[in-house]
Amino acid sequence: MTLTVKPIAILDDNYAWFLRDEATGVTAVMDAAVVEPIADFVKAEGGRLDWLLITHHHGDHIAGIAELASRTGAKVAGNANDAQRLPKLDVAVKPGDVFALGTSEADIIDTPGHTRGHISWHFPSGEALLCGDTLFAAGCGRLLEGSAAEMFASLQKLSALPDATKVCCGHEYTLSNIRYALSVEPGNEALKAFFELAKSLRAEGKPTLPTTLGTEHAINPFLHARDLAHFAELRLGKDNFR
Ligand code: ZN
Ligand code: FE
């Protein structure tokens, strides 16, 4: 594997992600919402920080970026189409662009729904998908700015990526997502097995992430939506669940 990907647990239930292109040693942190915990993590990984990457403009994904950039000199990259709501960008990427993290290339995928300017970063060679608040383990992001149609289309794009792809999302919402998922798919054996795994990981204080797209195809009800109306119904059901 040419790309190392590690979760950094921050805030109450967020993950930033540490990325390293092993061929060159170039590193990045995705969605650096805090300063000290991320600076400490980077230090423990050897101290090199080249890039600060962004999925979307929410504070729980960007609030540490300006300070980390000025401390380390790391460059900031995010969606050109949402630049007015992001920290100052050194590299403004657009959906369809390819971003090079050393020798590891990321396809920039437009994934609106949670926010208008949300993008996902797919590293095919590293089999990693950094998808912020779009696709979660056993769930998907809330529709804060976008429509159900936008989120449905965004999830369809992500779910078409290879099954081995690691799903590196922005929150540890897995247990609550599974409880809802079980309410709509009570007979899903893969989902039940994943619930047991997720419970034991959380009991040990470990992340349930990354999952893989193969796992998500088996357990995620939002990827099982027959059509847009069914997806919208599932999303509304989750919004109103408990
Ligand atoms: Zn968000
Ligand atoms: Fe978030």
Image (cartoon, rainbow, N blue to C red):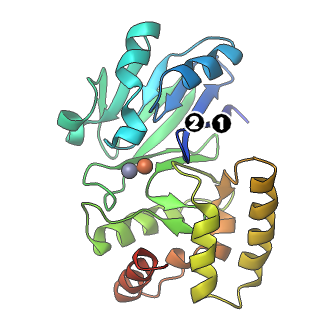
The x, y position of residue 241, in whole percent, is 47, 79
Q: Is residue 73 above or below residue 61?
A: above
221 relative to 149 in the view: left or right:
right
* Residue at which label 2 appears: 17
Is the residue 39 above or below the residue 172 in the image? above
Q: Quadrant of the N terminus?
A: top right
Q: Position of residue 44 (x, y in %)?
A: 70, 17
Q: Which amino acid type is shown beneath numbered disc 1?
A: Val
Q: Is residue 46 left or right of residue 80?
A: right
Residue in the image at 34% along x and 88% along y: 229
Kindly identify the residue that appears in the image at 74 percent across and 54 percent down. Answer: 202
In the displayed structure, 50 sits above or below 226; it is above
User: Can you give x and y, in whole percent of width and height, for residue 109 in the image?
Assistant: 39, 50
Q: Nearer the viewer, mark 2 or mark 1?
A: 2
Quote the CA–CA distance across marks 2 and 1. Answer: 7 Å
**Residue 32 visible in rendering:** yes
- Residues marked 2 and 1 touching at CB (< 8 Å): yes
Residue at (32% x, 24% y) in the render: 91
Circle number at residue 5: 1
Give how far across and how far down residue 209 sits, in percent: 67, 51
